[in-house]
Structure formats: C-alpha cells, structure tokens
C-alpha cells in the first residue's frame, strides 16, 4: 500500500502515525518542533488522507504497510510515535518487527480491546449528502446538529475536501471504517513481550488508559513508562502540544 507522507528535519528517523479520522496534517506543528532534532516522517495511514484506499483495514495490514514504507525509504530502524489508531498500529509493528524499532511513543491508547466509540461520528459524517451541499459552512452546520463538541467538530471538518468546483467529499474512506469497526476495536495480542523501550502518554481527562489497561501495558511492554498530561483529553497532543512535545523529546533524547 502506497502511503502519503511528508518529511522534515535531519537526524535519526522518527515516524508519526495519526489516529482514526485523522491525517498527517494534524501533526505538522509538533512534527516541526521534533524535526529540530530528528528526521521526521508524518504518514497518512491507509484509508486516510491521501494514502491508498482498501477494503482491508486492520492492524496487521497497517503494520505491514509501515514495513513497506520503511523499506521503500531505506529506513533500517526508526523511533515510532502513534496516537490512538496509529498507536495500536505501532504496537502491532513492534511485536511483528522488533528489530525495526528504536523507541516507541504511544499516545492515549493501550493494547486492550475497546468498545465501539465511533458509530455516532460515522453516522454524522455519512448523513452529509454531498449531492446537495454547496459550501463548507453548510457541511459544518449539518454536522454540528449531531456533533456537539466544538473540538471534535473542527477535527472532523479537516477531513472535508473539495473534489471539484461543485462538490465535496471526505478524505477518510468511511465505508472501509464502517465495515471494519470490529477490527479497529480489537486488542493487540502477542505470545511474547516487547522488551524494548516504550513510553505511553495518557490524557488526564481521558478514559482510554485506566488502571486495568496499565496492568496490560506492563504485561506486554515490561519496560514501558507511563506518563500523564494533566487536563488533556484523548486528543492530548492538540490540547497540550508543549507538554506533549517536551515529554517526547525528553524520552527520545535518552537514546542519544
């Protein structure tokens, strides 16, 4: 699968993977800061942004996409940073190809199975009739009738793009997401531990990593550190970009 990407900076490689409904553009600001010390690749996952589309949408496929990406760009090993969907992808990758991983940074997600939290978002996005809407403001108004969080609304609006002069569309392949919701929620499982260094960063106001998930993290990632950004939600990198970047840089700097 050919993945869209942007590359900035110099130094050791660092690959960043976004979350569900996201795209590489969500990480531009943080990537620029990290690129002062690292060669940063921000990547669109399959079925997102400008990357290829497929009916196959699971963590094994996305792990293999990442391997193909690294091989294509002659990256022997890399630091990996992933948020939510991207975080689970790099966990799968770490179990599949541990020799390819330097340090892991996983943002507000654990290896655990999660119940479907996305149906409402998908329903709201699919409710837009692109045969009738004529402007971004019209799309935003319709979306706001179901999406009450202003943060989430603006995040989803970044998914909107103009297909041509008269019509719009969503960058995310919603059909593939809808058909694979069970795959998205599945746990990342392994018969062996990942014994490399890993940092899990949780949002203080997020419920994605509770004590139960912390125990699972320690079981599968015995050398993992778990840090909390106080006051941050699941979108911790957007809520507290300075704190997130500082944690990432301090952690990655330990490898130098």
Image (cartoon, rainbow, N blue to C red):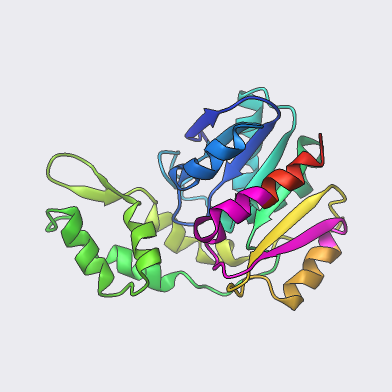
For image coordinates 81% across by 42% down, the residue present is 254
Observer-nearest residue: 103 or 193? Answer: 103
Asked where in the image residue 77 lies, by quadrant, the reply is top right
| Range of magenta residues | 220-246
For image coordinates 57% across by 62% down, the residue present is 183
Instruction: Tell me the quarter of the image containing the C terminus.
Output: top right
- Left or right of residue 55, residue 17 in this image: right
- Left or right of residue 64, residue 195 in this image: right
Question: Residue 97, can we see it?
Answer: no
Residue 18 pos. (x, y %) = 53, 49
Q: Is residue 237 magenta?
A: yes
Residue 201 pos. (x, y %) = 68, 60
Observer-nearest residue: 22 or 247? Answer: 247
For image coordinates 87% across by 59% down, the residue present is 222
Query: Is residue 166 positioned above or below 116 on the image?
Result: above
Residue 68 pos. (x, y %) = 62, 32
Question: Residue 200, can we see it?
Answer: yes
Q: Residue furthest top?
A: 74
State the count of labels: 0
- Left or right of residue 109, residue 196 in this image: right
Residue 138 pos. (x, y %) = 16, 61
For image coordinates 40% across by 39% down, the residue present is 50
Q: Is residue 6 magenta?
A: no
Asked where in the image residue 165 lies, by quadrant, the reply is top left
Observer-nearest residue: 4 or 46? Answer: 4
């Amino acid at each position: 699968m050919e993945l869209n990407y942007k590359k900035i900076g110099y130094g050791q490689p660092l690959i960043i993977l976004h979350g569900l409904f996201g795209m590489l553009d969500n990480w531009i600001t943080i990537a620029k800061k990290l690129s002062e010390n690292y060669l940063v690749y921000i990547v669109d996952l399959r079925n997102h942004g400008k990357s290829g589309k497929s009916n196959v949408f699971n963590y094994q496929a996305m792990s293999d996409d990442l391997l193909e990406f690294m091989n294509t760009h002659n990256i022997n090993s890399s630091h990996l940073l992933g948020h939510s969907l991207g975080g689970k992808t790099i966990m799968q990758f770490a179990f599949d190809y541990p020799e390819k991983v330097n340090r892991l940074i996983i943002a507000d997600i654990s290896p655990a199975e999660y119940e479907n939290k996305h149906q409402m978002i998908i329903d709201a996005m699919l409710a837009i009739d692109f045969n009738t809407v004529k402007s971004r403001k019209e799309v935003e108004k319709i979306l706001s009738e179901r999406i009450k969080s202003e943060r989430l609304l603006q995040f989803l609006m970044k998914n909107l793009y103009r297909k041509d002069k008269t019509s719009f569309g969503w960058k995310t392949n919603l059909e593939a997401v809808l058909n694979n919701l069970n795959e998205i929620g599945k746990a990342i499982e392994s018969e062996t531990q990942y014994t490399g260094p890993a940092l899990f960063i949780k949002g203080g106001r997020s419920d994605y990593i509770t004590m139960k998930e912390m125990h699972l993290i320690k079981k599968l990632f015995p050398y993992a550190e778990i840090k909390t950004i106080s006051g941050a939600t699941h979108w911790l990198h957007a809520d507290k970009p300075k704190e997130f970047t500082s944690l990432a840089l301090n952690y990655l700097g330990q490898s130098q």
